[in-house]
């Protein structure tokens, strides 16, 4: 599950870089006056060694740069050793970033412990610039590490144990402090090196924290009120579930995400009460009409867990939401400059098909319905013309009524119809209106949303 830190900067590589730097800076100058540590990189198993130089021509700048480079080399040697000893708590994609984080931490620690660093020698010449030879006693550095690891252990235990040991604290509280503790350890230079006793168990501190997180997740179950929920598409869905724990704690406020099972897409996040109860209507407009398989899963990102590499088997529950299209009635009326309307049944059928395509509804001809569609055709005659044609203008006003009250209205553009008689003109105008109505996407979006209003 985790990747092991096995790369890093070898001693041979450090010596190689040192040698190349010496050659580049020294050029053709004589080496007779140089100290031996500039000619042959020193090796001492009791010390970490850092040598660095700079030759910019500015003596003051070279003095500072050379010392910083020597410190960086020394820190790199320590980092290489630590990276080879511990497990990086990161995915393979993040391993490089995690190792770089360790190097940065060690560099900072070295800078914070300058009193422990010994200046063995320094050298300056106009041709070679400034050079420094620094070293740090390994035993002394180990003592510094042990002190820092003890500080981390004490800090984490002070955060975690008071909550884990108190059953009046919620599962949400326990998860939060465990993740906080895990983050402190993992972002230190010693994630896999700190030995500890946590809640009576011995082991590596980061492993103990992960075990407690796994235990806490195992105590939690998500219980759906119904394994199959019937609802109307586009309407709020009444959802009831509970989060329960088996270790005697209250769940606390926990976020449960609803995911589309096939794609893993998050539909919505539901936050429970402190007792772990959720009983409310949710907007699931992202689901299509028909059977939808949904997974309810604990969201730990909101507890600070986002992006962590350690894997936890999170509590989850599966259920089915069967979304049926909303049933609605339809009335069609005519107003304005009218003559006899032919084929009213055909017009009604065309309007019904057009609205059924645009809206998340099933239109029924009979019965009482919560939602009613009122489709009104408004006619206006054009002035008489010299050619004897009948010319009319038609537009539609559409209202969505809920329990008799209007919740949405829409007016189309006006379309021209012409023919040898009024009936032909009406047929031509309606064809244009219906054709262009199918292209008006605003109606589908806005009118569809109106069905979700309570």
Image (cartoon, rainbow, N blue to C red):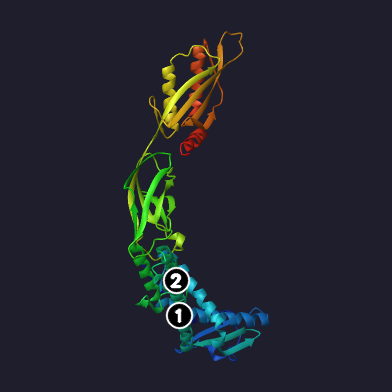
10 Å neighbourhood of mark 2: few (<14), some, or many (≥20)?
many
Q: Give the number of marks.
A: 2
Give the residue at x 47% y 76%: 155
Residue at x 50%, y 31% (from the top left corner): 405
Judge left or right: residue 408 versus residue 265: right
The crowding category of the residue bearing disc 1, from other C-alpha atoms within 10 Å (few below 14, some 14 to 19, many at least 20), is many
Spot occupied by residue 214 in the image (x, y as percentages of width and height): 35, 66
Quarter of the image where one finds residue 26: bottom right
Q: Is residue 70 left or right of residue 331?
A: right
| Camera-side residue of 406 and 140 | 406
Q: Return the x and y of residue 223 as percentages of the image width and height.
A: 33, 54
User: Relative to 199, does residue 251 appear above or below in the rendering?
Assistant: above
How far is disc 2 from disc 1 in space, using C-alphas?
Answer: 13 Å
Residue 139 or residue 204, whichever sits in front: 204
Identify the residue at horizontal 65%, vertical 78% (top origin).
56
Residue 5 seen anywhere in this rendered image of the structure: no
Whichever of labels 2 and 1 marks the residue nearer the N terminus, that label is 1
Q: Confirm or deny contact between disc 2 and disc 1 (CB under 8 A).
A: no
Whether 111 is drawn above or below 219: the answer is below
According to the picture, the residue beneath numbered tag 2 turns out to be: 181
Give SS at disc 1.
helix
| Mark number displayed over residue 257 | none
Looking at the picture, does residue 8 appear above or below residue 380?
A: below
Residue placed under numbered mark 1 in the picture:
149
Q: Is residue 87 left or right of residue 33?
A: left
Q: Residue at x 53, y 81 (%)?
A: 110
């Amino acid at each position: 599950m985790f990747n092991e830190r096995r790369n890093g900067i070898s001693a041979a590589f450090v010596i190689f870089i040192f040698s190349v730097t010496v050659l580049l800076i020294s050029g053709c100058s004589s080496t007779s006056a140089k100290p031996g540590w500039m000619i042959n990189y020193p090796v001492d198993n009791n010390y970490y060694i850092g040598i660095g130089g700079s030759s910019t021509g500015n003596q003051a700048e070279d003095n500072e740069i050379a010392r910083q480079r020597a410190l960086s080399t020394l820190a790199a040697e320590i980092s290489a050793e630590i990276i080879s000893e511990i497990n990086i708590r990161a995915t393979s994609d993040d391993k490089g970033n995690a190792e770089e984080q360790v190097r940065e931490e060690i560099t900072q620690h070295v800078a914070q412990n300058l009193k422990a660093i010994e200046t063995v020698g320094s050298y300056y010449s106009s041709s070679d610039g400034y050079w420094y030879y620094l070293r740090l006693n390994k035993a002394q550095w180990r003592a510094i590490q042990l002190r820092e690891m003890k500080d981390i252990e004490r800090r984490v235990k002070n955060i975690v144990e008071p909550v884990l040991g108190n059953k009046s604290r919620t599962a949400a509280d326990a998860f939060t402090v465990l993740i906080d503790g895990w983050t402190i350890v993992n972002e230190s230079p010693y994630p896999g090196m700190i030995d500890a006793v946590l809640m009576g168990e011995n082991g590596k501190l980061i492993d103990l924290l992960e075990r407690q997180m796994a235990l806490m997740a195992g105590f939690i179950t998500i219980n759906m009120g119904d394994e199959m929920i019937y609802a109307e598409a586009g309407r709020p869905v009444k959802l009831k579930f509970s989060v329960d724990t088996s270790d005697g704690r209250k769940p606390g406020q926990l976020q449960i995400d609803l995911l589309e099972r096939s794609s893993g897409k998050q539909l919505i996040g539901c936050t429970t009460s402190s007792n772990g109860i959720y009983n409310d209507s949710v907007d699931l407009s992202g689901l299509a009409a028909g059977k939808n398989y949904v997974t309810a899963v604990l969201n730990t990102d909101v507890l600070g867990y986002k992006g962590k590499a350690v894997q936890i088997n999170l509590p989850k529950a599966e259920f089915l939401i069967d979304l049926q299209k909303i049933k609605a009635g339809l009335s069609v009326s005519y107003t304005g400059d009218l003559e006899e309307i032919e084929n009213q049944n055909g017009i009604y059928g065309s309007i019904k098909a057009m609205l059924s395509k645009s809206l998340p509804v099933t239109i029924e001809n009979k019965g009482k319905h919560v939602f009613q569609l009122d489709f009104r055709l408004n006619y206006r005659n054009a002035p008489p013309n010299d050619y004897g044609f009948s010319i009319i203008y038609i537009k539609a006003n559409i209202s969505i009524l809920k329990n008799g009250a209007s919740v949405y209205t829409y007016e189309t553009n006006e379309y021209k119809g012409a023919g040898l008689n009024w009936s032909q003109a009406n047929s031509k105008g309606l064809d244009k209106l219906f054709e262009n109505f199918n292209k008006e996407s605003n109606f589908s979006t806005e009118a569809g949303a109106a069905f979700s209003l309570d």
